[in-house]
Image (spheres, rainbow, N blue to C red):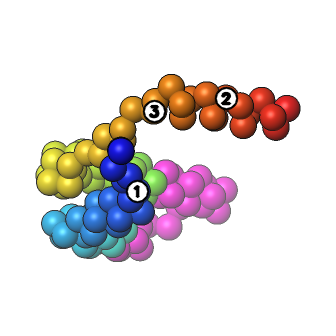
């Protein structure tokens, strides 16, 4: 008889390692620091002309979004390199012919 896999337990175990390495806290700290630095830099710049004020705001928001996306990209690559090798990968058992026939029958009955 095939051993059943408790997918919920596997998902819970893998998600517990997500916060284990401290990278999430470092990412949030870096994002807050960069955003604060950008706001500080924007406050010290001379005020542009009234017509260019909207363009300056859009430029600041664009730089802020680009920096945030760069930090998130670095975070994902660090997670792939550091955290994911520790959590392991789950390989579910291959479905048997009986399972495939059952699911085919069920899907055809819904039509």
Residue wearing tag 3: 95
* Category of crowding for the residue at label 3, using alpha-carbon neighbours closer than 10 angstroms: few (below 14), some (14–19), many (at least 20): few
Secondary element under disc 3, as helix, strand or loop, is loop
Residue 43 in the magenta stretch? The answer is yes
69, 110: nearer the viewer: 110
Of label 2 and label 1, which has the lower sequence position? Answer: 1
Of label 3 and label 1, which has the lower sequence position? Answer: 1
Residue wearing tag 1: 7
Residue 83: x and y in percent read 19, 55
Say whether residue 10 is left or right of residue 57: left
* Real-space Cα separation, disc 3 to disc 2, in angstroms: 12 Å
Q: Which label is found at residue 55?
A: none
Above or below, 98 against 59 in this view is: above
User: Is residue 81 at all visible to an observer of this figure?
Assistant: yes
Identify the magenta region.
Answer: 36-62
Q: Are marks 2 and 1 in contact (CB under 8 Å)?
A: no
Secondary element under disc 1, as helix, strand or loop, is helix
Task: Give the residue at the far front of this rendering.
Answer: 1
Q: Are marks 3 and 1 in contact (CB under 8 Å)?
A: no
Residue wearing tag 2: 104
Which corner quadrant holds the C terminus?
top right
């Amino acid at each position: 008889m095939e051993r059943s896999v408790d997918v919920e337990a596997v998902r819970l175990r893998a998600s517990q390692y997500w916060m284990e390495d401290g990278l999430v806290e470092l990412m949030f700290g870096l994002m807050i620091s960069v955003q604060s630095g950008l706001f500080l830099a924007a406050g010290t710049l001379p005020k542009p002309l009234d017509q260019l004020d909207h363009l300056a705001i859009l430029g600041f928001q664009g730089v802020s979004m680009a920096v945030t996306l760069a930090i998130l990209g670095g975070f994902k690559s660090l997670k792939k390199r550091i955290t994911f090798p520790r959590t392991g990968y789950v390989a579910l058992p291959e479905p048997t012919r009986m399972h495939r026939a059952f699911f085919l029958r069920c899907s055809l009955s819904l039509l």
